[in-house]
């Protein structure tokens, strides 16, 4: 869960003490206003400069001079960086990530303080050779380079070069499998690298069991900096023998989608070839590109994600970030995402010298809002801890040397590479918390309690001083007319709404609502000509945004179905049609008839519960004080965060492509699952079973 801020500050202070005491004492040697103890640490594509702070300094200037092997200058000294007090949380140990040079070249650095506009003396110089592009040029695999690397950032990697490069990695590394998720409107492959150690699991379901992480590198075609970082990182993950890398890959699977918007990248446009901004389409999935990504999320079930962009605000930090803010996102996912950003990225940024900050930062404008069409929010509503990543497009006032285009591109790409590597480290260190937050969120969502908001964000407060950004994004509170205080049990769609032709896709055609709901992975129950989408599901916060009449960007006007059974009821209950029990106590056996459906939340059934040939049985946050037997169901089965005091049997259920869910449930008795097609899944949330588990449920 979220770290307390007091802990963060304590950690930062520790770092400060460590850095300060590690530096050689400058006593007596230098005037007090001269920077001392300058160090230069080399990393992938950047150099972390650190120094002893000067009392009363307003800011610092970082100077870089190219030198030859003997340390003799080969070019003019240039001010390449301005360190300001708002750029890192721990100001007692200033650091600056200098990037924007040709990796492998040798430089001399000096740093000086300014008091007001008065320039103080420079520090003594530090000379070092920077880290060459990753990978031994003589080792197969490691020797691969992207078009961007071989042209020294003069050209971005083309689509054909990307395909050749990733195919070569696939061929040369046992750790990597490249899969095609789909095709763009113009028929470009949308590829994903699936990376694990010693090899990636064979199927999406097997990958899902490893709690994978997903990086979406390039949705806006004219924001290519993150994509180049993804391609470099893929090579590192594929071939590095660094124990950190093999450890990371032994504990998860890394999913990298370099280019979801290949048409936009090829044409250097923000949108796809139809002009659609794909980062306004992840909920509606009108476009083949976004549909491919959302099906990937359904099948591979990443638990954490990053979404790469560039930001044209010259006053922002290096790396604006933002969690899923939509108020329908479950609190644990919001908290975990904030922990990743503020708890990890701000702290690590202060060590490495990168300036992470809340999206918006200074004068950010009306950005970072609650549209569920944005991947950041869509993923949050799918219970994925995640963040937006922006790379400040221009050098801005703090990186005055980036009028040089190649240098500007290098800074952006290597700052993205740092972020994605940190993302993997965060997942490795906080995996248990991420999974707990996900499990809690799925159970909270499935319980279907509390208001629904159709648009509106959680506030992002300014990080307490010292802070890395003065201006968080706008409040974006939900307007009263976009709040629904009492949620329905389900939405009912007519057959025309569900299966009818649509014209909201490219070229005036579109997939049906049924196909899009299937892509999201929601359970649907069909009774006669009516199609019910219950809200007691893991994506409860997203369903109304697409199916409620109040939805701002919706698929259709579904009919709200209120609970049909509440309060206390005595005697046997025979369920026909669609029955929704909420906050109910049913004293007696319950039988779900063939073709009927039972949906429950916060309900207690004395039992037994028997369903044979039902259309659907969805229990959440409910208790059955007796045996449960569900057989021959045709549409949907879901049992989440339930307690069953008795033997539980799921058999011969045939629910199409939609696997029965049994998750976070306590069963006081044996659990038997036989002949179900597909086999049940637990969504990564273990059940507690006080009895033997057989066959298909043995691992649940
Ligand atoms: Zn963007």
Image: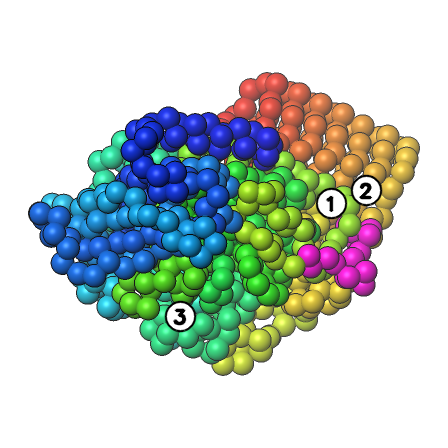
Would residue 595 be found to the left or right of residue 136 on screen? right
Q: Which-is-in-front pick, marks 2 and 1?
A: 1
- Which residue does the image show at 32% across and 30% down from the upper left? 28
Q: Is residue 323 above or below residue 676?
A: below
- The local secondary structure at tag 3 comes to loop
Quarter of the figure that contains the N terminus: top right
Within 10 Å of the Cα at label 3, are there few (<14), some (14-19), or many (20+) other Cα atoms? some
Res 361 → quadrant: bottom right
Estimate the x, y position of residue 550 in percent, counting from the top left: 75, 65
Estimate the x, y position of residue 209 in percent, counting from the top left: 45, 37
Q: Which-is-in-front pick, marks 2 and 3?
A: 3
Q: Name the residue nearer the viewer: 465 or 543.
A: 465
Measured Cα–Cα span from mark 2 to mark 1? 9 Å
Picture colour scheme = rainbow
- Which residue does the image show at 75% across and 66% down from the upper left? 549
Label 3 near label 2: C-beta < 8 Å? no
Tell me the residue that label 1 is attached to: 448
Q: Name the residue nearer the viewer: 213 or 50.
A: 50
Q: Name the residue nearer the viewer: 185 or 333.
A: 333
């Amino acid at each position: 869960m979220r770290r307390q801020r007091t802990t963060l500050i304590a950690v930062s202070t520790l770092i400060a003490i460590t850095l300060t005491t590690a530096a050689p004492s400058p006593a007596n040697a230098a005037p007090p206003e001269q920077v001392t103890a300058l160090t230069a640490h080399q990393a992938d594509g950047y150099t972390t400069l650190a120094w002893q702070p000067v009392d009363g300094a307003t800011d610092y200037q970082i100077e870089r001079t190219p030198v030859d092997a003997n340390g003799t200058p080969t070019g003019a000294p240039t001010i390449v960086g301005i360190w300001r007090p708002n750029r890192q949380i721990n100001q007692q140990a200033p650091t600056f990530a200098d990037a924007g040079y040709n990796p492998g070249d040798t430089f001399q650095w000096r740093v000086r303080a300014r008091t007001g506009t008065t320039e103080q003396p420079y520090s003594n110089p530090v000379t070092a050779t920077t880290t060459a592009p990753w990978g031994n040029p003589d080792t197969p695999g490691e020797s691969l380079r992207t078009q961007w690397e071989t042209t020294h950032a003069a050209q971005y990697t083309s689509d054909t070069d990307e395909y050749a490069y990733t195919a070569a990695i696939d061929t040369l590394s046992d750790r990597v499998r490249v899969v095609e998720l789909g095709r763009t409107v113009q028929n470009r492959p949308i590829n994903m690298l699936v990376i694990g150690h010693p090899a990636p699991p064979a199927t999406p379901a097997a990958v899902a069991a490893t709690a994978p992480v997903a990086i979406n590198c390039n949705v806006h075609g004219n924001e290519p900096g993150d994509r180049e970082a993804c391609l470099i990182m893929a090579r590192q993950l594929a071939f590095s023998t660094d124990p950190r890398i093999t450890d990371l890959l032994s504990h998860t699977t890394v999913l990298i989608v370099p280019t979801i918007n290949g048409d936009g990248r090829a044409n250097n446009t923000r949108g796809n070839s139809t002009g659609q901004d794909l980062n306004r389409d992840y909920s509606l999935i009108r476009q083949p590109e976004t549909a491919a990504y959302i099906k990937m999320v359904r099948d591979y079930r990443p638990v954490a994600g990053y979404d790469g962009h560039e930001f044209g605000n010259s006053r922002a930090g290096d790396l604006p970030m933002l969690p899923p803010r939509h108020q329908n996102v479950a609190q644990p996912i919001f908290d975990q995402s904030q922990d990743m950003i503020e708890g990890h990225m701000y702290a690590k940024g202060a060590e490495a010298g990168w300036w992470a900050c809340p999206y918006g930062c200074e004068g950010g404008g009306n950005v970072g809002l609650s549209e569920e069409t944005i991947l950041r929010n869509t993923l949050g509503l799918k219970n994925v801890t995640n963040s937006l990543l922006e790379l400040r497009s221009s050098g801005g006032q703090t990186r005055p040397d980036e009028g040089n285009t190649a240098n500007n591109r290098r800074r952006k790409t290597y700052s993205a590479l740092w972020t994605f590597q940190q993302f993997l480290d965060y997942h490795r260190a906080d995996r248990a918390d991420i999974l707990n937050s996900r499990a809690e969120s799925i159970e909270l969502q499935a319980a279907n309690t509390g208001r629904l908001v159709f648009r509106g964000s959680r506030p992002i407060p300014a990080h307490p001083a010292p802070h890395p950004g003065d201006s968080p994004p706008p409040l974006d509170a939900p307007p009263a007319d976009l709040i629904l205080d009492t949620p329905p049990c389900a939405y009912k769609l007519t057959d025309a709404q569900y299966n009818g032709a649509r014209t909201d896709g490219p070229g005036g055609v579109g997939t049906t609502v049924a196909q899009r709901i299937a892509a999201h992975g929601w359970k649907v129950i069909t009774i006669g000509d009516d199609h019910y989408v219950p809200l007691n599901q893991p994506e409860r916060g997203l369903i109304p945004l697409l199916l409620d009449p109040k939805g701002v960007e919706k698929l259709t006007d579904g009919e709200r179905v209120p609970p049909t059974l509440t309060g206390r009821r005595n005697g046997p209950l025979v369920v026909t049609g669609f029955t929704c029990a909420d906050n109910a106590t049913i004293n007696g056996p319950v039988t779900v008839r063939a073709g009927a459906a039972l949906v429950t939340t916060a309900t207690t059934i004395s039992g037994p519960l028997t369903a044979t040939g039902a259309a659907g049985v969805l229990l959440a946050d409910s208790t059955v004080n007796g045996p449960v037997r569900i057989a021959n169901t045709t549409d949907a089965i879901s049992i989440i965060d339930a307690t069953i005091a008795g033997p539980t049997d799921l058999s011969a259920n045939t629910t199409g492509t939609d696997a029965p869910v049994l998750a976070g449930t306590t069963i006081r008795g044996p659990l038997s699952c036989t002949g179900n097609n597909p086999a049940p899944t637990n969504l990564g949330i273990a059940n507690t079973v006080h009895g033997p588990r057989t066959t298909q449920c043995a691992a649940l």
